Image (tube, rainbow, N blue to C red):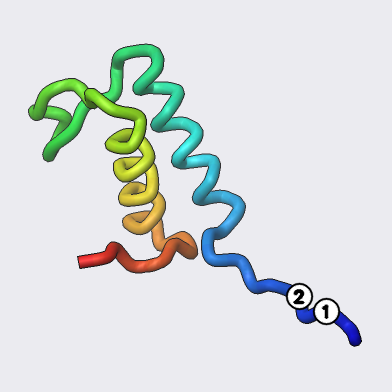
Amino acid sequence: MARKAKKRKYSRSSGGDVKNEVRRYKKGTAKSGRGGKGGRVKSRKQAIAIGLSKARKKGKKVPKKKS
């Protein structure tokens, strides 16, 4: 039996946005909140969430946020 190809949930370019945000977090320049007025990003998970959010705003293929 032939295996069915899986469809991507996230676009390749959205991964780049996340990678960029994690890099900023490691460097210590990533900030949360509107216009960066909030505090520093404290966890890796938070950095990933911000990266995905930025990708969504750009209109890239990213699943909707779980409410």
Q: Position of residue 48 (x, y in %)?
A: 38, 40
**Cα–Cα span, label 1 and label 2:** 6 Å
Q: Residues within 10 Å of mark 2 (few under 14, many from 20)?
A: few
- Which quadrant of the rendered structure holds the N terminus? bottom right
User: What SS does tag 1 mark?
Assistant: loop
Quadrant assignment, res 28: top left
Q: Which residue is identified by label 2?
A: 5
Mark 1 touches mark 2? (CB < 8 Å)? yes
Specify the amino acid type for callout 2: Ala
Question: In the picture shown, does residue 18 fall above or below 64?
Answer: above
Viewer-nearest residue: 66 or 31: 66
Question: In the picture shown, does residue 63 fall above or below 47?
Answer: below
Question: In the picture shown, does residue 28 fall above or below 35?
Answer: above
**Of all residues shown, which one is farthest toward the right?**
1
Q: Which residue is identified by label 1?
A: 3
Question: Marks 1 and 2: which is nearer the front?
Answer: 1
**Of all residues shown, which one is farthest toward the front?**
1
Viewer-nearest residue: 35 or 9: 9
User: What SS does tag 2 mark?
Assistant: loop
Q: Position of residue 42 (x, y in %)?
A: 23, 23
Q: Position of residue 59 (x, y in %)?
A: 41, 62
- Which quadrant of the rendered structure holds the C terminus? bottom left
Q: Position of residue 11 (x, y in %)?
A: 56, 59
Viewer-nearest residue: 63 or 14: 63
Q: Residues within 10 Å of mark 1 (few under 14, many from 20)?
A: few
Residue drawn at x 38%, y 22% is 24
Residue drawn at x 18%, y 33% is 32
**Is 66 left or right of 25, judged from the image as shown?**
left
Specify the amino acid type for callout 1: Arg
Residue drawn at x 33%, y 67% is 64
